[in-house]
Amino acid sequence: MVTKIPDMAGAARAFIFLLEARDWDAFAALLHPEVVYELPQTRERIRGRDAYLRFNQEFPGDWHLDPTTVVADADHGVVRFDCRVEDESAEAIAFLDFDAEGCITRVTDFWPESYAPPAGREQLVERW
Amino acid sequence: MVTKIPDMAGAARAFIFLLEARDWDAFAALLHPEVVYELPQTRERIRGRDAYLRFNQEFPGDWHLDPTTVVADADHGVVRFDCRVEDESAEAIAFLDFDAEGCITRVTDFWPESYAPPAGREQLVERW
């Protein structure tokens, strides 16, 4: 008997690669039918694989995703990725929850924006 | 012989709890002397435990931190946490890199801000 041990880090990386490839069938196969997608910054929520798939398929722009850091344990994965649209590049973070079979049951995205450094700590920091 | 296996999830949680407790000695003990702290959103970098400790000790406001999600593997930890300052609450994310002894060698913070949901996907989303 072979016990399948799900590879959560691999699944988290595949999540980004399959989005980038627009390989919708393989992407959908990662997702639980009742997957919940949340964007805490806009307080938006999408319920179900079909709606979440459509959200990604219809997302405007010629976006390109590239994972930079993946951290995973038995139940969760986190992937930091670059998102490039033409000349603009941004960094984003997705938290993934997995069920016992390794299906993604929840996706929580963060899209942090640049801001000006607060005054008063210039003596401690360097800029890049 | 006992081989010490560092508990990265515990260290990631302790990172937030010890900041919240202002327990600076115990907090410093988690950090490598050459720890690097980065804030990609402002492109600020702080080098070394002493400067990073001072940055936290001098951070203005009566801030309170509470971890909500911890994900860790052998080399990395990620902690999502709520940061409350008086009546204002925000969510933040810290990525931690560990060395072989479990010391934190790098901290990368993200502070995502709220924004208005883009138009054109109202039919797919609910708000909360």
Image: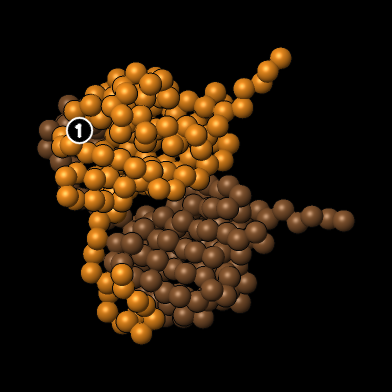
Chain colours: A orange, B brown
Where does the C terminus of chain B fall, quadrant-wise? top left
Identified at 51% across, 38% down, the residue is A9
Quadrant of the rendered image containing residue B125:
top left
Instruction: Judge whether B70 appears above or below A35 on screen.
Output: below
Q: Is residue A55 visible?
A: yes
Question: From this viewpoint, which residue is outermost toward the bottom?
Answer: A123
Query: Left or right of B126: which side holds B87?
Result: right
Query: Left or right of A114: which side holds A12?
Result: right
Residue A73 placed where, x, y %? 56, 40
Residue B76 placed where, x, y %? 54, 53
Q: Between residues A5 and B30, which one lies in front from this camera angle?
A: A5
Question: From this viewpoint, which residue is outermost toward the left?
Answer: B119
Q: How packed is label 1: few (under 14 Cα within 10 Å), some, or many (20 or more)?
A: few
Quadrant of the rendered image containing residue B117:
top left
Query: Left or right of B106: which side holds B28?
Result: right
Subunit under mark 1: A
Where does the N terminus of chain B fall, quadrant-wise? bottom right
Q: Between residues B19 and A55, which one lies in front from this camera angle?
A: A55
User: Which amino acid, mark 1?
Assistant: Phe
Q: Between residues A102 and A81, which one lies in front from this camera angle?
A: A81
Query: How many marks on residues?
Result: 1
Residue B30 placed where, x, y %? 60, 67
Q: Is residue B9 visible?
A: no
Secondary element at image label 1: loop
Query: Left or right of A21: which side holds B120?
Result: left
Residue A46 placed where, x, y %? 29, 30
Q: What residue would you read off at disc 1?
A: A59
Instruction: Judge whether A14 appears above or below B5 on screen.
Output: above
Instruction: Judge whether B63 appears above or below B112 on screen.
Output: below
Identified at 54% across, 65% down, the residue is B105
Instruction: Judge whether B36 appears above or below A18 on screen.
Output: below
Identified at 68% across, 55% down, the residue is B6
